[in-house]
Image: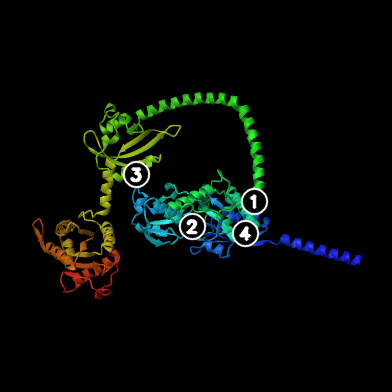
Amino acid sequence: MKRKNSVLMRLLSVLLLLSLTCGANAQEKVRLQLKWRHAFQFAGYYAALEKGYYKDAGLDVEIVEGTPKTHTTEEVLSGRAHYGVGTSSLILERKAGKPVVVIANIFQHSPQILIARKFSENQTIHDLIGRRLMLEPQSEELLAYLKAEGVPLSALRIQAHSFTVDDLQSQRTDVISAYSISEPYHLTAAAVPFQIFTPRSAGIDFYGDNLFTSESEIAQHSERAKAFLHASLKGWEYALTHQAEIIELILKKYPVGTGESNTRAFLSFEAKEVASLMRSDLVAIGYMNSGRWRAIADIYAGLEMLPENFSLEGFLYELSDKEASGNWLVNRIFFVVILAATLILIFSSYIFFINRKLKQTISELKAHQARLRLLSVAIEHSPAPTMITGPDTTIEYVNPEFTRETGYELDEVVGRTPKLLKSGLTSKETYDAMWKTLAAGKLWSGELINRRKSGEIYWEEAHIAPVFDGAGVLTNYVAVKRDVTEQKIANEKLAHLAHHDSLTNLPNRVLFFERVRETLKSASLSQRRVALLFIDLDKFKPVNDTHGHAVGDLILQEAAQRMRLAVRDSDTIGRIGGDEFVGLLPDLYHEDDAVLVARKLCDVLKEPFRIGEMQQALGVSIGIAFYPEHGEDERTLAKSADVAMYHAKQSDAGDICIFSDEMRGRYPFNRDSV
């Protein structure tokens, strides 16, 4: 009997050992759903997997990249994934009744931004009104930003996001939602002028790339959740301190596509930006502050996207009571030790510190006085006009160069304000933007139209900065200026030449069809008709060949002047090359109005041209196309007018022809009208 019991005990021991061995080797399968394709944005998770941190925690982790169609929250709540990476819109999902739980905030600042094409200098968020915006899903943070800035979504033309900067580069859209860690790199590499608008400029500073799970995961697998979190944060610590290694790992095992996105240069840029958003130099990786989440909820509530005092209970991951108690005891002991050491250090260093501080203060005061003397000499002899005012903008000092440029002596301006230079020609929007920037404590740079003492108007480039004392109190404004009148005149001349025909001074092809595009946009809103005319001088080439280009140029100049005087003030006549002209007639109530204008053009162009002793008569052919029936964009409309003009030239129908569908395809063209 004893022998049987002994054998049985040994058998049970072997079975127990086998079960323990199997249990030690078995790893729980866990699926992490990323919100986008592989990138350094998720480097910490790759590091945790490749360095074995997940394996050491008993986890067999699968990392799944996202696509534009991936809804990370649904993947986690459906059970297809255990953990996910999401935006701060998770709080809105929670409000919608979805049991999501945030377990760590990886980015202390959100990377979500708006990127706009550079429409003009000094453009603001309000310049986006009426523009096309490609907006990706889960961009509630950007919606909150637009609403806070007074730019309603209804004021924008929303487009489906293509998730590429190509549409911004090719001007198929005007603004895109983007991430600060990627799209700016691609636009800079493509030399596309752009401007970034960030919600942080409006005080909307949300967390980004939040690691989250479901309530059921926390309830049923609390130990797994804790193990996954700790291993992930350890992976992030490794990734940030071994960026070059992780970049090579991503290129080898987690390729981010083709082109610029799959290069060391791009991943290095992304790594730098990710580090700046995580701010691990200031806070622990994954740090989560309930007070800041409360502020995020309050911002959403203020924008009517959440109810007031929305409860965060259950939304933020919390340690168990046992863990919290243990941590409290450790923290309490640590606090007492640190406090005691600090008191000893303060007491023993007090006298030394005071003496050192006194010497340092005296040294700094002498250095400061020397810098002030040097600065005053530099400003006095500066080649740039310089003005210093008090915080109430009362002028306290101007240098000699200011006197030379404006004509005002120092004693004439001290005690007055810069308004004495105002010409009344600088826009209110420019001044509003200037004061908004200065009120934020930032340098403002821009152009002003001012008036000298003599009354002469001039353009100046101004750089104005607020000056604060050590306590952060505004003490002065300093303005450094430069006369740019000649440069503005030269630029305006160049701009005019770039958009006007040098012979006739009419709008050239570029400017004309730019006006066509703008007119069609306006017409689509007002439901007005627009006519496009193609005008060709008949028999001009023989005259040009017989009498020479000098005579031909004089005829073209006279023809341009006649047409300019024959049309309405709202109409535009342009020259697109040779003896070909075009006309734009907006705001038509009936097609007869366009025919009347075309008839008037025919009449004035058929009158003989007198060049010295020579008299020359020409014919004219005009094709007319109407918006919207003959084309809803400038290219189609121009093609229709071109076909109609060709028909007028080839048929006996007369010198004016209106496009019809029967003409389409009858006259093949190889040239591009636009």
Q: Which residue is mark 3?
A: 433
Q: Position of residue 464 (x, y in %)?
A: 36, 37
User: What kind of residue is marked 1?
Assistant: Asp
Residue 16's disc is none
The quadrant in which residue 541 appears is bottom left
Label 3 crowd (10 A; few <14 / some 14-19 / many >=20): some
Q: Is residue 473 left or right of residue 448?
A: right
- Between the residue at mark 4 and the residue at mark 2, the CA separation in whole angstroms equals 22 Å
Q: Is residue 437 left or right of residue 51?
A: left
Residue at 54%, 49% (x, y): give it. 290
**Callout 4: helix, strand or loop?**
helix
Q: Position of residue 319 (x, y in %)?
A: 62, 51
Of the two numbered discs 1 and 3 on the same chain, state the one appearing first in sequence.
1
Q: Which residue is mark 2?
A: 92
User: What kind of residue is marked 3?
Assistant: Ala
Of the two numbered discs 4 and 2 on the same chain, state the one appearing first in sequence.
2
Residue at 26%, 54% (x, y): give it. 499
* Viewer-side residue, 336 vs 656: 336
How many numbered discs, if any?
A: 4
Q: Position of residue 528 (x, y in %)?
A: 24, 64
Residue 321's disc is 1
Answer yes or no: is residue 412 visible: yes
Q: Which residue is mark 4?
A: 219
User: What kind of residue is marked 2?
Assistant: Leu
Of the two numbered discs 1 and 4 on the same chain, state the one appearing first in sequence.
4
User: What kind of residue is marked 4?
Assistant: Ala
Residue 126 vertical placement versus 450 (above, below): below
- Between the residue at mark 1 and the residue at mark 2, the CA separation in whole angstroms equals 28 Å
- Between the residue at mark 1 and the residue at mark 3, the CA separation in whole angstroms equals 53 Å
